[in-house]
Amino acid sequence: MTTPVPLTPPVRAEYERPLEPVGDLAVDAPLPFAKRLASQSWPRRVLIALVLIAVWEALARAMNNDLMLPTFGATLAAFVQGLVSGELLQRTAVSMSVLVRGYLLGVACAFVLTSLAVSTRIGRDLLSMLTAMFNPLPSIALLPLALLWFGLGTGSLLFVLVHAVLWPLALNTYSGFRAVPATLRMTGRNYGLTGLRHVVLILVPAALPAILAGLRVGWAFAWRTLIAAELVFGASSGNGGLGWYIFQNRNELYTDRVFAGLAAVIAIGLLVEQLVFDTLERVTVRRWGVQS
Amino acid sequence: MGAADPGVSRVSTDAARDLADAIRPRPAEPPAVPATSGRLLAIDRVSLEYRTRERVVRAAHDVSFDVYGADRFVLLGPSGCGKSTLLKAVAGFVPPVSGTIWLDGEPVRGPGTDRIVVFQEFDQLPPWKTVLQNVAFPLRVAKQLGRREAHDLALHTLHKVGLAPFAHAYPHTLSGGMKQRVAIARALAMQPRVLLMDEPFAALDALTRRRMQEELLRLWDDVRFTLLFVTHSIDEALVVGNRILLLSPHPGRVRAELNSHQHSHESVGGDAFRDRVADIHRLLFDTAEVAQ
């Protein structure tokens, strides 16, 4: 056994040196093309889509039953034919016009409700009561009631659409408002902003990540509700939307057209997600550095 | 000094006055007294409370002090002494439970643009506005300046704090010190009667903090704004302030009011400065022992 000797570090000489220029070293260089491509998500997504299509095509060929599962090729043909004949486009336009109206109405209602909720205590309780009651209620379950009240037509569709958009959006917006830092709220009040001006100039932009998430969810809910509603009560005055197109072709056993209609539903959903919401996010919350 | 400075005679209790007299160096009377400013802000026997869900907490009790024009008035005290709440009361965010806050002879009744607050938190800058828009925003909404005027004034103020090259950057791309400089520029551009600062440099690293203190003093030399500054750092209080109000631990009561105009970054580490720090330390923490 040796007793451990407590060590002290040696005292070394001090030195100073002049800073040398870094020379040719690139301090800030662009990434090479392959690495930039790899950091994008769309090549991977395209790959996934191609694999899914290949699986579908293989399954359909194995079953060999056009009535149950048409091939991708047949669906594509029906889709193109629907586009060329204009029927698919016209049905889509009908659906979209109802959808956009219902969506905007729902957004407006959500804005009013959440503005009330952040400015008054009774409004807050009202919002939490209503969302607790109605958010779990599927919009489609309200359709019979809507038909009774508003009849067969756009009124009923708008009613269920507003119901589909309003609650998830109001819930998201309100939680976004509440998450706005107290400092930022005080800054707004410091400039004499109160009431609606405070909501519009401070709370809405500050809560935009949550609001955008709510708008996305609301959009998806509205879209699926609309298609379902059209499937249930079909056309009003012979002017049906995409849901009606799907329903009608199923009745006539044009399964490839049913698939084409479904593909249109999916395509529009994807397009809006990618073009509208992703663009909105890119020019707002990502640019501001509040969401990565 | 003594008689020349009308604020010196105001000390809350006899004991504190004795102590303050004992520790105050008595320099020779200056030969010629320059014109002095008048009283701008009067805090008159103010008590403050804040509410949690279960209890009411008294943050400050029976606090009185006066701030004169072009003062760099520091509220100094240990954490939990209610100094931040006092500042928020002056800003109009917290109404006093008793007593009155007078600004220019008018009682303070809520937030206003004559008192602009610079907070400690970096999220006081709306992340959706560029540096320039951040400074111009209150000029537009509160001072009703035109777009052009607000833009020019904002740019001019940014020049003053050395941030003109970053006018079009978003806050999330700036360092902490730069964000605080934007907040200071934004406050100065509003030309408030009193500039309120709530531990504005507490979240910065030591090197940046020192530079920001120097810059603040340089700006004060330039603009001669009236400053009410909250800090828990004795060194910072002595360097930044010309007058220091010492607050006791919870609930905050006035312990002493001291002069510190003779101290600057140059005197840090000198004997006089060290003695002053020791005095203040004793004043702050004697009370803590008595309270126990």
Image (cartoon, grey):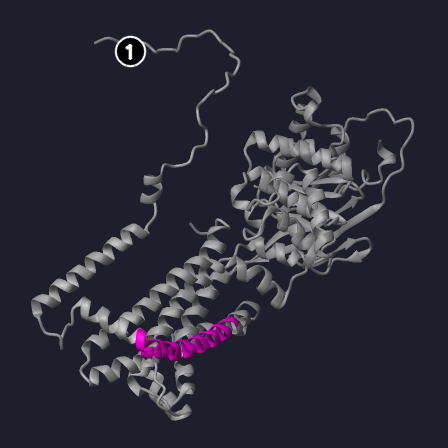
From which residue to which does the magenta span run?
A: A84-111
User: Relative to A223, does residue A9 appear above or below in the rendering?
Assistant: above
**SS class of the residue under badge 1?**
loop
Which residue lies under the disc numbered 1? A4
Residue at 87% in and 35% down:
B3
Q: Nearer the viewer, residue A150 or A50?
A: A50
Q: Residue at x 32, y 79 (%)?
A: A87
Q: In the image, is B287 to the left or to the right of A253? A: right
Q: Chain for mark 1?
A: A
In the rendered image, residue A231 lying in the magenta stretch gets the answer no
Disc 1 residue type (three-letter): Pro
Residue for point 29% across, 81% down: A245
Residue A11 drawn at (x, y percent): 44, 8
Classify residue A167 as left or right of residue B26: left
Query: In the orientation shown, which residue stands out farthest toward the right?
Result: B32
Q: Residues within 10 Å of mark 1 (few under 14, many from 20)?
A: few
Depth order, front residue of B56/B168:
B168
**Is residue A266 positioned above or below B258 on the image?**
below
Q: Quick check: A15 left or right of B163?
A: left
Which quadrant of the view contains residue B259? top right
Report the magenta stretch's main SS. Answer: helix
Q: Position of residue A229 (x, y in %)?
A: 33, 82
Horizontal and vertical percent position of residue A263? 27, 70
Nearer-the-camera pick, A106 or B282? A106
The answer to whether residue B154 shows anywhere in this view is yes
Quarter of the image for residue A241 reads bottom left
- Report the residue at 66% width, 43% height from top: B184
